[in-house]
Amino acid sequence: MFMRFCQILAGIGTVVGLLTEPARAADYMKGKVTMDDGSPPPSPVHIQRNCPGSGPVTDATTSKQGMYLWHVSNNIYVPCTLQAEFPGYVSNKIDLTLDRIYLSMELPTLVLHKVGMAAAEGGFKLSKSAANSWNLALKAVGAEKWEEAERELRATLRAAPQFAPAWNALGAACQNQQKTDAARDAYRHAIEADPEMLLARLNLTRLELASRDWSKAAQAAGSLIRADQHHEYLEAYVDDTIARYAMHDLDGVEATLNTGLALDSRHQFPRLEFFQAAVLWAKGDRQGSVEHLKRYLN
């Protein structure tokens, strides 16, 4: 039975290669800002990108209809958010580290809500020298100049050794230079510095998958699943499935898929359907397998 399962998933190497890369987006994405009643804002609104340890950057300004174009940048390596800035109002945030937002050409809508007084957003306070090197590192990461990014990130961490975003970005810089051990160490430091930083757990999982270290990949994916209380990173269930498949843990694969499919109500990760089809086929449930395969193709 398991050999049949292996035959169905013979292309596992290709699948792993696709999953260990961040989502690739277009150069620009469309966005929209509305008031809480759905109407356009009364005047143009600034769209700000907020990154830890750095001040807000205005990336776009809306039209009279509340529409804007956003130039895609730093979609996975630095935990940044987009937010609408309008006096007397506060908007929801778009988490730019979530791969699923790049599956469409349109960003989630930013909705403005009136508030009496918006509280200043907290964050890690960097010294002047650390902030300077961090800002240089952000530019280098955005330009994919990995050697320069690593140099500036290490300078940042010498001044601020508990700054988790810099450890995470250092992991990405090292990974993109094929410095696997250094990248793994950096991601682990990021998690230790900030256990709530899910992006570092995701990047560590991707690193272990790319390294074909299936046991460590399953551990990393499981750690992400347990820490992700709001189920933001459902791709962890796909990653865990691949790692457990490679370890011949068919029961573990099925348990992970059952949970992941139940959570993926919007069908944002059709690969879960593909793997479920393979499991059902291996168990002899041809009809159930075909149904999940149809959902995967649709």
Image (cartoon, rainbow, N blue to C red):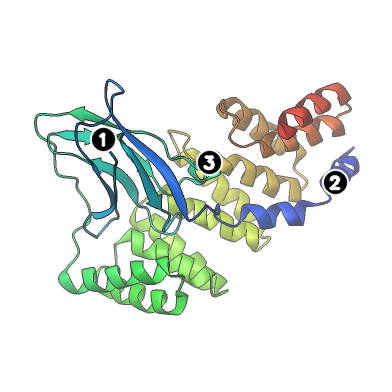
Residue 69 in the image: above or below residue 252 = below
Position of residue 125 measured from the top left corner of the image (x, y, whole percent): 18, 59
Q: Is mark 1 on a helix, strand or loop?
A: strand
Contact flag, marks 2 and 1 (Cβ < 8 Å): no
The answer to which of 240 and 60 lies nearer the viewer is 60
Where the N terminus falls, by quadrant? top right
User: Marks 2 and 1: which is nearer the front?
Assistant: 1
Q: Is residue 214 visible?
A: no
Q: Mark 2 points at which residue?
A: 6
Question: Could you tell me the amino acid type at mark 1?
Answer: Ser
Number of the label disc, if any, that sits on residue 201: none
Q: Mark 1 points at which residue?
A: 91
Number of the label disc, if any, that sits on residue 104: 3
Mark 3 / mark 1, whichever is N-terminal: 1
Where the C terminus falls, by quadrant? top right
Contact flag, marks 2 and 3 (Cβ < 8 Å): no
Between the residue at mark 3 and the residue at mark 1, the CA separation in whole angstroms equals: 21 Å
99 relative to 42 in the view: left or right: right
The answer to which of 37 and 274 lies nearer the viewer is 37
Residue at image point 53% right, 69% down? 175
Question: Could you tell me the amino acid type at mark 2?
Answer: Cys
The 10 Å Cα crowd at callout 2, few under 14, some 14 to 19, many 20 or more, is some
The 10 Å Cα crowd at callout 3, few under 14, some 14 to 19, many 20 or more, is few
Quarter where residue 293 is shown = top right
